[in-house]
Structures are given as C-alpha cells and as structure tokens.
Image: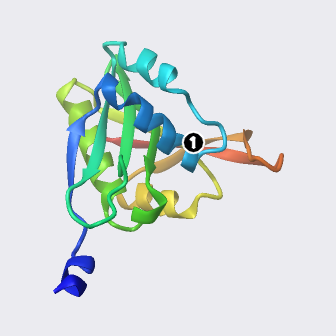
Amino acid sequence: MLDNYLNRKHEFEILPMATADCPAVSLLHGERFAQRWGDGEFHSLLAQPSVFGFVARQTTGLFKPPLAGFVLSREAAGEAEILTIAVSQKLQRSGLGWRLMQAAMRETRNRGGSVLFLEVDDGNHSALGLYRKLGFEKVGERPAYYTAPDGRRATALVMRRVLG
C-alpha cells in the first residue's frame, strides 16, 4: 500500500501568484538560478498592474516542496514576456513547466496580448525543448548575456510565440 502511495503521479494546483508567495518564490529562484532575485524584487514586480504570475503547489506525495514551481510575466501593449520561470529540480519532467507556461499564455491572451517573448540560456536544453514544443521560435540572440557562478558567459536566445 505504501509503495502505491510513493509511486503515485504528482498532482499540482496552479494558482495566481500572490505577494505572500514571494519568499517561497525567491527561495526556489535561488535554487534554480545563479543570480537569485530577492522576495522584495518579486514583491515590487507583482505590485505593478502589468505583471502577473502563477505558482504551482504539489497536492500529492509524502515529500511536498513548499513551492513546486512558478512563472512570472509582464504584458504591455499587446505583447508579453516571461520574466522568469522555475520548477523544483525534484519535479523536473513532471509536466509542470508546460502547465505553468500554458497558464501564462492564457493570461496573456486574457489581457489582450497576442505575442509572448522569453529569453533562455542557449545551454539549457530541457527548457529549449519545452519552449520549442510550445511553439516558440528563436528570433534573436544576446551574446554573453548570462554569467554562470564559474564566470562562464552564455548566450541568451530570444524566443517568440504568436498566440492564436
């Protein structure tokens, strides 16, 4: 019986991001990115009417992280951008990134946006695979845009998806 419980598929609820989520969002951001954004930065962004986000909370399993994932976006004049997105490393390949991106795309459309942009490290192959499956196409590059903890510089790919 315990084996069945441990092997259950992960289930999540996707909810609008609130300012109360900012400390947990900041912690997860720090786990996934070399340059952690503080909870004050997330709070300041969420205070802007053009900024919106979603958090994912795991609803099944014994070992639930405080936050399974999040996405933060900004929309203006019919265009939107993904500011940042992260999924707990333990939950990668669970479909959570897909669901968070779907929520951001829906909300972009609801706000009148017709195109969504994002930037991604050209070495982040799992993220690139997700974005390509979602219909994003490369439209530009920013050489040496990201700096890794070891000082290595990486190119940011600028990607776009027209929302239909």
- x and y percent of residue 61 in the render? 25, 67
Which residue is outermost to the right? Answer: 151
| Relative to 121, 10 lies left or right | left
Between 47 and 98, the one nearer to me in the picture: 47
> Is any atom of residue 8 visible in this view?
yes
Question: Seen in the image, is 102 located left or right of residue 125?
Answer: left
Is 87 in front, or is 132?
87
The quadrant of the rendering that contains the N terminus is bottom left
Give the residue at x 22% y 24%: 112
Say what amino acid the circle numbered 1 marks. Answer: Gly
The residue under the point 24% across, 86% down is: 3
Dot 1 lies on which element? helix
- For the image, the number of numbered tags is 1
Residue 49 in the image, given as x and y percentages of width and height: 31, 13
Going 34% across and 63% down the picture, which residue do you hit? 63
Q: Which residue is mark 1?
A: 30
Q: Quadrant of the C terminus?
A: top left
Q: Position of residue 52 (x, y in %)?
A: 31, 26
Does 43 sit left or right of 1 as displayed? right
